[in-house]
Image (tube, grey):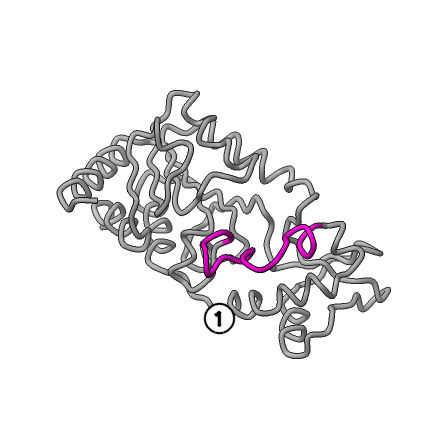
Amino acid sequence: MLVNDYEFLVGKAIDLLRQARHAVALTGAGISTPSGIPDFRSPGSGVWEDVDPMAVASIYAFRNRPEAFYEWLRPLADLLGRAQPNPAHVALAQLEAYGPLKCVITQNIDALHGRAGSKNIYEVHGHLRQATCLACHHQYDARPFLEAFTASGAVPICPDCTGVLKPDVVLFGEMLPFREIQAAQREAAGCDLMLVVGSSLEVTPVADLPRLTRQSGARLIIVNFTETYADAWADVVIHADVAEVLPRLARPFLP
């Protein structure tokens, strides 16, 4: 991308944000890669690079061999525990505090948006803050169990019934949390601008949200390294580093 093209696109995106009254952000794995968390599909670094996701991260595989899931999760859980919000996360929190952004819809389970200061967050793929026993359905604060797991490698067990604890993340074969996806769809249909950040828009139903936004007549800005299906009809597409672009978009709104 030429420098002049980049500056023009950043300026156009800022103008659209200034015109917006109810903007929403949709974020994917690409917003957290500057924090050291790998995405899912990038050659050489993706989470699924050497693993069949259906063999370790489906609800069916978890019920049959939870130890395989936890063996795969262990290095990722360690990374998530050490990761810090990056400038892109902070910029979205600033756009919510001082600009037109009303909420963040995220596919990520890393909780970095909340730690960066965002208040209205819809985690459509779940999170690691809680864990649920598959046998008695008792819920627990997941942190002590995950800390013990990363230290020992032992599968977390329910203290009440000795059933296996599953983190409250959405595995393949599971439904998305109803309230979260319903709220996300409502925001996508009701906003006047959607800012897509770091998402390849390949995983449905979340990938359909930009289409829902466009059908309502709203504007669409996409900031992502790689192309998406929505690039052809987005108002602004910036293929660049989200941690560099997002602070540029937020800067005019800061007090």
Q: Is residue 168 left or right of residue 112?
A: right
Residue pictured at 28% horizontal, 36% vertical? 17
Residue pictured at 17% horizontal, 40% vertical? 5
Residue pictured at 42% horizontal, 51% vertical? 30
Q: Is residue 129 left or right of residue 159?
A: left
Give whichever of 87, 152 is nearer the camera. Answer: 152
Q: Is residue 250 left or right of residue 63?
A: left
x then y, percent, for residue 129: 61, 60
Q: Residue furthest left?
A: 4
Quadrant where the N terminus sits is top left
Residue type at tag 1:
Arg
x then y, percent, for residue 174: 70, 43
The residue carrying pointer 1 sits among few (fewer than 14), some (14 to 19) or many (20 or more) residues within 10 Å by Cα, namely few
Residue pictured at 17% horizontal, 38% vertical? 8
Q: Residue furthest right?
A: 161
Residue that label 1 marks: 82
Give whichever of 236, 22 is nearer the camera. Answer: 236
Q: Main secondary structure of the magenta part?
A: loop
Residue extent of the magenta highlight: 40-58
Q: Residue furthest bottom?
A: 152
- Seen in the picture, residue 74 relative to 64 is either above or below; the reply is below
Residue 96 lies in the magenta stretch: no
Residue 54 lies in the magenta stretch: yes
Q: How many marks?
A: 1
x then y, percent, for residue 158: 79, 65
Secondary structure beneath disc 1? Answer: helix
